[in-house]
């Protein structure tokens, strides 16, 4: 996604008190990268040295994160790229759709995409020129959440905006997407990515729900 030229570019918080928010933004960024394209050399190398133990033993994301890292270490980049192509880049109809409209409305480019574009205009966001996918692609939505967490414009990048966007454009269908990926017999690395994504989105949903408690 790209921002309106009148708006300032994204920056990341650096203070110690912002560590949790930075971590959330980084996870959204990682999911966006993984679901937009197979890992490049730099990202694949990062998995080789990634820490798999959570700061607190038994933390909810620890098991699924460890499974994702293990898959990245077991499979080389060529294997993961072939898997990505098989699952998401099929000629005609892919094995698994990565678009919210498909899971919400049962077909592509329907009313959910129109509603999403309206939300993006309100946020001053637009699809990047180099982005080949529609705005309801899971990678695009994760990038928006990343911006809403880490952007430096407090009027746009704030908890209320995160919650509204998550509830309107992610909460209702991401579990179905993850289920579809995990159930596909060709999914290996991406089955682990989907499991980690499912756990992460569940944590996000629970945290947003606690705002009403």
Image (cartoon, rainbow, N blue to C red):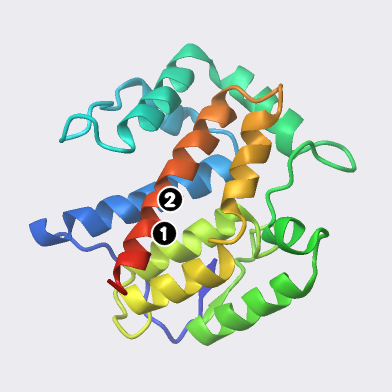
Q: Residue drawn at (43%, 33%), measured in percent from left and top? A: 43
**SS for callout 2:** helix
Q: Residue 81: x, y in percent?
A: 64, 27
The answer to whether residue 36 is visible is no
For this view, does 46 lie left or right of residue 168?
left
For the image shown, how many numbered marks are present on the structure?
2
Q: Residue drawn at (86%, 42%), measured in percent from left and top? A: 93
Answer few, some or many: residues within 10 Å of disc 1's Cα (few below 14, many 20 plus, some between 14 and 19): some
Q: Is residue 84 above or below residue 2?
A: above
Quadrant in the rendering for residue 20:
bottom left
For this view, does 25 lie left or right of residue 51?
right
Residue 159's label in the rendered image is none
Answer few, some or many: residues within 10 Å of disc 2's Cα (few below 14, many 20 plus, some between 14 and 19): some
Q: Residue 76: x, y in percent?
A: 53, 16
Q: Say which residue label 1 marks.
A: 205
Residue 202's label in the rendered image is 2
Q: Residue 159: x, y in percent?
A: 32, 73
Q: Is residue 6 above or below residue 59?
A: below
Q: Is the residue under label 1 in contact with that under label 2 (CB below 8 Å)?
A: yes
**SS for callout 1:** helix
Q: Residue furthest right?
A: 92
The answer to whether residue 17 is visible is yes
Q: Residue drawn at (28%, 26%), measured in percent from left and top? A: 52
Q: Of 6 and 64, which appears nearest the observer?
A: 64
Quadrant in the rendering for residue 66:
top left
Q: Residue drawn at (42%, 31%), measured in percent from left and top? A: 42
For this view, does 121 lie left or right of residue 5?
right
Quarter of the image with the N terminus in it? bottom right
Q: Residue 111: x, y in percent?
A: 76, 75
Q: Of 188 and 173, which appears nearest the observer?
A: 173
Q: Is residue 59 above or below residue 4?
A: above
């Amino acid at each position: 996604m790209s921002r309106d030229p009148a708006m300032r570019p994204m920056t990341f918080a650096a203070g110690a008190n912002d560590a949790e928010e930075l971590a959330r933004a980084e996870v959204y960024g990682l999911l966006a990268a993984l679901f937009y394209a197979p890992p490049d050399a730099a990202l694949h190398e990062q998995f080789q040295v990634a820490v798999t133990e959570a700061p607190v033993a038994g933390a909810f994301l620890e098991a699924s994160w460890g499974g994702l890292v293990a898959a990245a270490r077991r499979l080389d980049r060529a294997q993961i790229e072939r898997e990505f192509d098989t699952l998401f880049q099929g000629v005609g109809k892919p094995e698994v759709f990565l678009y919210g409209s498909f899971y919400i409305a049962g077909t592509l480019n329907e009313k959910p995409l129109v509603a999403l574009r309206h939300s993006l205009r309100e946020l001053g966001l637009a699809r990047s020129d180099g982005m080949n996918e529609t705005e309801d692609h899971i990678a695009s939505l994760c990038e928006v959440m990343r911006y809403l967490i880490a952007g430096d414009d407090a009027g746009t990048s704030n908890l209320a905006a995160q919650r509204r966007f998550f509830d309107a454009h992610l909460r209702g269908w991401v579990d179905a997407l993850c289920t579809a990926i995990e159930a596909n017999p060709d999914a290996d690395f991406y089955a682990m990515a989907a499991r980690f994504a499912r756990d992460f989105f569940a944590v996000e949903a629970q945290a947003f729900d606690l705002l009403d408690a």
